[in-house]
Image: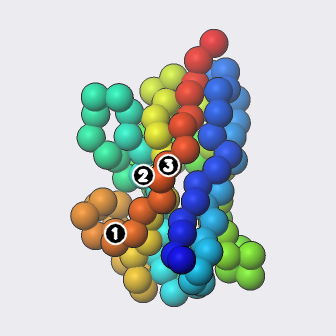
Amino acid sequence: QLQLVESGGGLVQPGGSLRLSCAASGFTLDKYTIGWFRQAPGKGREGVSCISPSGTYTKYTDSVKGRFTSSRDNAKNTVSLQLNSLKPEDTAVYYCALLLGWRNTLRAGEYAYWGQGTQVTVSS
């Protein structure tokens, strides 16, 4: 059974950090671009970051540049998103998603398979 599972979300104070993970089972991630997206209550899904299959290339939306870092360990079949200097406006459900091959895009419609999401709440 193919599964993509996010973990690592939680409640954190402003300025704090979290590390999200996206783990695959039933298939290997090494041929896929992995995108990270988020959706806040009442808002549309926003592309946050993507990382190429080899991990060589990354892309970030402007609001998270310098604060979030995407990485991957294909040997462990996982991709991570390090969230630093968190702000209340980062509060959302975070999703990882797959795109076969490499495409430098944060457009949700181009990603074919999604995890179930993990909640990140930034609040004092």
- Could you tell whether 109 is left or right of 62 in the image? left
The secondary structure type at the circle numbered 2 is strand
Asked if one can make out residue 63 in the rendered structure from this viewpoint, the answer is yes
Upstream in the sequence, badge 2 or badge 3? 2
Tell me whether circle 2 and circle 1 mark residues in contact (CB < 8 Å). yes
Does 34 appear above or below 41?
below
| Kind of residue sitting beneath label 1 | Tyr
Mark 3 or mark 1: which comes first in sequence?
A: 1
Q: Is residue 72 left or right of residue 47?
A: right
- The circle drawn on residue 37 is 2
Residue 117: x and y, percent? 49, 49
Q: In the figure, residue 56 lies in which quadrant? A: bottom right
Quarter of the picture containing the C terminus is top right
Residue furthest out toward the top = 124
Q: Is residue 84 visible?
A: no
What residue do we see at 29% from left, 61% from top? 107
Residue 61 percent coordinates (x, y): 41, 50
21 versus 34 height, above or below: above
Mark carried by residue 45: none
Amino acid type shown at disc 3: Gly
For residue 111, the mark is: 1
Q: Secondary structure at mark 3?
A: loop
Image-quadrant location for residue 41:
top left
State the residue position of label 3.
117
The kind of secondary structure element at disc 1 is loop
Q: What kind of residue is marked 2?
A: Phe
Closer to the camera, 80 or 23?
Answer: 23
- Which of pointers 3 and 1 indicates the residue nearer the eye? 3
Alpha-carbon neighbours of circle 1 within 10 Å: few (<14), some, or many (≥20)? some
Residue 77's place in the image compared with 50, above or below, is: below
Image position, residue 30 (x, y; %): 58, 84
